[in-house]
DNA sequence: CGTTCATATGTGCGCTTGTTCATATGTCTT
DNA sequence: AAGACATATGAACAAGCGCACATATGAACG
């Protein structure tokens, strides 16, 4: 697959030492994949503001309970959210303080990009 | 689509006021989508260490020049990387200081999760 | 126990996405 | 101008993903 034509030994040696191993980068991609869907990021953002039950989220996003439930399962498997039962309803909340900081990190980037676009 | 059964007025009102508008959340998801692929995150990580030409990246990742080129186009369209021509070769580098900080943000989360897994 | 409400899960479908293959563009050298 | 090298691009195909629909589980309450 790899095609080596000209020389990059110097630059590649430096990078090769610094780059994390494949498993780590794979996990990283998997993590960001969770934030890379509009529905999931809406859910995560909402939960960062308040604990919510499934049908509250469905109502908020204007989506099926089933769709939300499927996404919540993905987020729970990834340990980004946790549940608390209260009778028939199940309340979801963030299981990790980092979730909001990751979102904010991306948010900051977007806002700066918009600012730059206006100045052009 | 939305099914409102029981009451969540209090919780929903609070969330509704705080949550960003759809366009912003859409942009956010699109941004994270870029980091949600192993190939792209490897490229971004590598470029955060050093400026690299296309075939250096291909060699580093053990992938086709074409595959890398396609991904670089996506990253360039998103203004995450920029190019600098040097004769026949084209050198890519990060176009945004935030890229590395977003990656680091996710990295931190993963590492903490691994630490927690060991303690169980 | 049977019904109702809240949530979960299995299945199938349409759409997106990453890669490959083939080819085009662009640059330097002779 | 022709060839070699570096990169870009277009088309097509396989795999993955999100959602809808139908159905299952599980809890409360008469």
Image (cartoon, coloured by chain):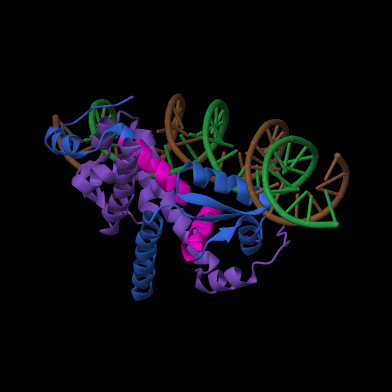
Chain colours: A blue, B purple, C brown, D green
Q: Where is A88 relative to A31, above or below? A: below
Residue B55: x, y in percent?
Answer: 26, 35
Left or right: C5, with D4 as reference point = right
Q: Closest to the observer: D9 or A29?
A: A29
Which residue is at the front of the view, D23 or A119?
A: D23
Name the image quarter holding residue B12: bottom right
- The part of the image, by quadrant, that contains residue B58 is top left
The one nearer the camera, B70 or A31, is A31
Number of dots carrying numbers: 0
Q: Which residues are magenta?
A: A24-49
Spot occupied by residue A89 in the image (x, y as percentages of width and height): 64, 55
Question: Residue B112 colored magenta?
Answer: no
* Residue B35 in view (yes/no): yes
Q: Quadrant of the N terminus of chain A?
A: top left
Q: Residue at point 35% right, 65% down?
A: A108
| Residue located 60% across and 58% down the image | A53
The reply, left or right, for residue A58 in relation to residue A83 is: right
Q: Dividing the image into 4 quarters, which one contains the C terminus of chain A? A: bottom left
Residue at 23%, 48% (x, y): give it: B48
Residue B68 visible somewhere in the drawing: no
Whole-percent x and y of residue A68? 61, 51
Does the magenta segment cover residue A40?
A: yes
Please report the residue visible at 23 percent of the width from the left and 35 percent of the height from the top. B56
Q: Main secondary structure of the magenta part?
A: helix
């Amino acid at each position: 697959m790899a095609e080596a034509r000209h020389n990059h030994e110097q630059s590649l040696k430096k990078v090769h030492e610094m780059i994390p191993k494949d498993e780590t980068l794979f996990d990283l991609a998997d993590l960001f994949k969770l934030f890379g869907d509009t529905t999931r990021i809406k859910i995560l953002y909402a939960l960062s503001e308040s604990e919510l039950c499934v049908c509250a989220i469905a109502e908020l996003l204007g989506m099926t309970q089933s769709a939300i439930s499927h996404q919540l399962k993905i987020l729970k498997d990834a340990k980004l959210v946790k549940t608390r039962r209260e009778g028939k309803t199940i309340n979801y909340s963030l299981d990790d303080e980092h979730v909001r900081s990751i979102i904010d990190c991306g948010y900051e980037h977007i806002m700066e990009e918009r600012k730059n676009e206006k100045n052009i």
